[in-house]
């Protein structure tokens, strides 16, 4: 995974994060997408609506970077 230093992370727009309000889980490459999936349930303070929107952003980024997701919804994360 490409390491994002503070400067690069600060340069990202909100739309480059799964959780833009909190600027959590950047979606910059395939490794970041896989990391966002793995850490999804660790993000605190996000509403159900924010989680639904984050999952949509993760799915779009996964498609863009060729990451195959076995989960069909965010509710399947961590069950397996």
Image (cartoon, helix red, strand yellow):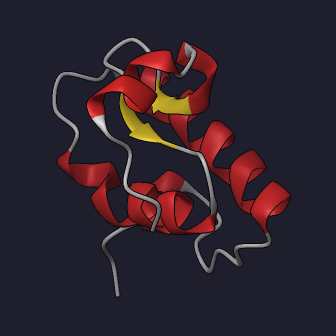
Give the percent coordinates (x, y) of residue 28. 60, 47
Give the percent coordinates (x, y) of residue 52. 54, 33
**Image quarter hosting the N terminus:** bottom left
Q: Which of 50 and 20 is in front in this view?
A: 20
**Image quarter hosting the C terminus:** bottom left
Residue at left 63%, top 57%?
A: 29
Residue at left 65%, top 66%?
A: 72
Eyeballing the image, is 25 above or below 73? above
User: Toward which corner of the image does residue 37 lie, by quadrant?
Assistant: bottom left
User: Toward which corner of the image does residue 23 lie, by quadrant?
Assistant: top left
Tell which residue pokes out farthest to the bottom in this image: 80
Q: In this view, does 14 lie to the left or right of 38?
A: right
Q: In this view, does 13 lie to the left or right of 40?
A: right
Q: Is residue 47 left or right of residue 74?
A: left
Residue at left 26%, top 52%?
A: 41
Eyeballing the image, is 7 above or below 69? above
User: Toward which corner of the image does residue 71 lie, by quadrant?
Assistant: bottom right
Residue at left 44%, top 30%?
A: 8
Number of numbered discs: 0
Give the percent coordinates (x, y) of residue 76. 45, 67
Eyeballing the image, is 44 above or below 35? above
């Amino acid at each position: 995974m490409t390491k994002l230093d503070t400067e690069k992370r600060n340069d990202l727009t909100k739309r480059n994060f799964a959780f833009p309000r909190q600027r959590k889980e950047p979606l910059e490459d395939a490794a970041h997408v896989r990391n966002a999936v793995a850490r999804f349930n660790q993000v605190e303070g996000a509403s159900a609506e924010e989680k639904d929107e984050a999952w949509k952003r993760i799915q779009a980024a996964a498609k863009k970077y060729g990451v195959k997701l076995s989960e069909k919804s965010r509710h399947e994360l961590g069950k397996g």
